[in-house]
């Protein structure tokens, strides 16, 4: 009997255990055959207002009178006032573009970080292109924009100074975002705060300098739409030579990527014609990722031409430089038998 009792007791224990396991299984939630989506409270995204494509502004149109952005007096750099952009920004976006003379072909090479068009003028019909770029740095270098505006005006009115076989492509403002800030330090940079002459693909460095300051070179070479657009245009067009205007180191500096320069003679030609110093590299501070060096690496002579001041366009001497550059492009060895080249 005691054996039977023991067996009965064991059976009862096992039965209780099975029931316990069964209860546990019952608590496992069954999966719904079609899972319901999780109800996540996503914030309703308010669509960002799409910025209307800016209409070209009269700021970029060549004129004999300095545009509004040319503030006549420049305070010492250490004493820069904070100027509201509207006080010096020039013609507001939305101003219609005046009609251009029929001799000028204009086109847009791309847009800035803030969506402004980057305009180019082509004057002449020759297949050899001399590229002239101003307004890489605006702000206190905005006199390079004045210079390019004067060049456009001049060469449109004096087409004989665009030599046979050549054409000029002039980009007065590579950095239209900076230009709209007026003559302030921030106007040096584009709408992303990037220094556009530290953003190119030759010797780019994340440690980029302007004088003794670190500046933003972009997150990588060609991170910025302005440098990408111009680089693409250069790759497609293959200009014969390029001049980038800056201020105010008073010199012509040959583009040179890792010592393979093709620009030294071109810098000398410009230096002789304009009277700016040439023949020495820029050594005031380390410079990386510049446009002229990247273009030099393509085998295209390219220079940074630094005006001697930050106010005047220095047009007269630079007109001579552009003519000398054309003569050199026609014949880099001998002076071409064109009156203006031997003048
Ligand atoms: Zn500059």
Image (cartoon, rainbow, N blue to C red):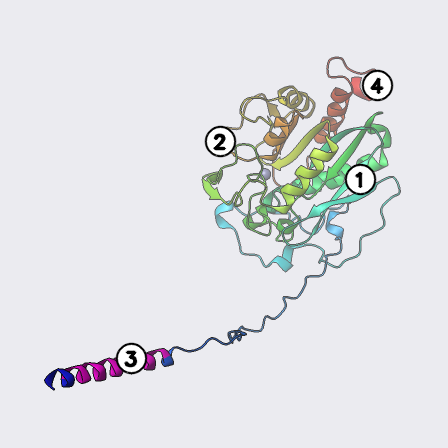
Q: Residue at x 51, y 34 (%)?
A: 287
The tag earlier along the polypeptide, 1 or 4, is 1
Mark 1: secondary structure: helix
Q: Is mark 3 within 8 Å of ligand 1?
A: no
| Residue named by callout 1 | 153
Q: Residue at x 12, y 82 (%)?
A: 3
Q: Are marks 4 and 3 in contact (CB under 8 Å)?
A: no
Q: Is residue 284 magenta?
A: no
Please give left or right for residue 339 compared with residue 148 in the image.
right
Mark 4: secondary structure: loop
Q: Report the span colored magenta.
A: 6-25
Which of 169/222 is in front? 222
| Residue named by callout 2 | 284
The tag earlier along the polypeptide, 1 or 2, is 1
Q: Position of residue 85 (x, y in %)?
A: 61, 57
Using a 10 Å C-alpha cutoff, classify the residue at mark 2 as few (fewer than 14 neighbours), some (14 to 19) or many (20 or more). Answer: few
Q: Position of residue 257 (x, y in %)?
A: 56, 27
Q: CA distance from mark 2 to mark 3?
A: 87 Å
Q: Is residue 160 visible?
A: yes
The tag earlier along the polypeptide, 2 or 4, is 2
How many badges with numbers are in the image?
4
Indicate the quadrant where residue 336 lies: top right
Q: Is residue 14 magenta?
A: yes
| Residue named by callout 4 | 338
For residue 57, the mark is: none
Image quadrant containing the N terminus:
bottom left
Q: Nearer the viewer, mark 1 or mark 3?
A: 3
């Amino acid at each position: 009997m005691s054996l039977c009792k023991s067996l009965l007791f064991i059976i009862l224990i096992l039965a209780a255990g099975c029931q316990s396991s069964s209860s546990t299984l019952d608590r496992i939630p069954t999966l719904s055959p079609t899972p319901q989506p999780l109800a996540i409270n996503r914030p309703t995204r308010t669509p960002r207002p799409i910025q209307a494509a800016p209409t070209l502004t009269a700021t970029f149109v060549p004129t004999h009178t300095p545009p509004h952005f040319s503030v006549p007096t420049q305070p010492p750099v250490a004493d820069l006032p904070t100027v509201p952009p509207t006080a010096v920004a020039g013609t507001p976006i939305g101003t219609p573009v005046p009609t251009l003379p029929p001799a000028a072909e204009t086109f847009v090479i791309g847009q800035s970080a803030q969506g402004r068009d980057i305009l180019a003028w082509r004057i002449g019909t020759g297949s050899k292109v001399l590229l002239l770029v101003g307004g890489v740095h605006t702000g206190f270098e905005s006199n390079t924009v004045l210079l390019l505006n004067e060049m456009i005006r001049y060469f449109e009115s004096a087409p004989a100074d665009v030599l046979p076989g050549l054409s000029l492509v002039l980009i007065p403002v590579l950095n239209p975002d900076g230009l709209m800030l007026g003559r302030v330090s921030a106007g040096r940079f584009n709408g992303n705060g990037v220094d556009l002459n530290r953003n190119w693909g030759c010797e780019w460095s994340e440690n980029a300098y302007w004088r003794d300051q670190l500046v933003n070179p972009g997150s990588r070479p060609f991170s910025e739409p302005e440098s990408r657009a111009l680089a693409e245009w250069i790759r497609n067009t293959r200009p014969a030579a390029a001049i980038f205007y800056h201020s105010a180191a008073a010199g012509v500096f040959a583009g040179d990527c890792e010592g393979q320069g093709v620009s030294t003679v071109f810098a000398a030609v410009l230096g002789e014609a304009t009277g700016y110093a040439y023949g020495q590299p820029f050594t005031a501070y380390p410079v990386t990722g510049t446009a002229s060096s990247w273009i030099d690496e393509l085998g295209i002579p390219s220079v940074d031409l630094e005006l001697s001041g930050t106010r005047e366009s220095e047009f007269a001497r630079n007109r001579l430089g552009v003519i000398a550059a054309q003569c050199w492009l026609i014949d880099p060895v001998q002076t071409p038998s064109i009156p203006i080249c031997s003048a």
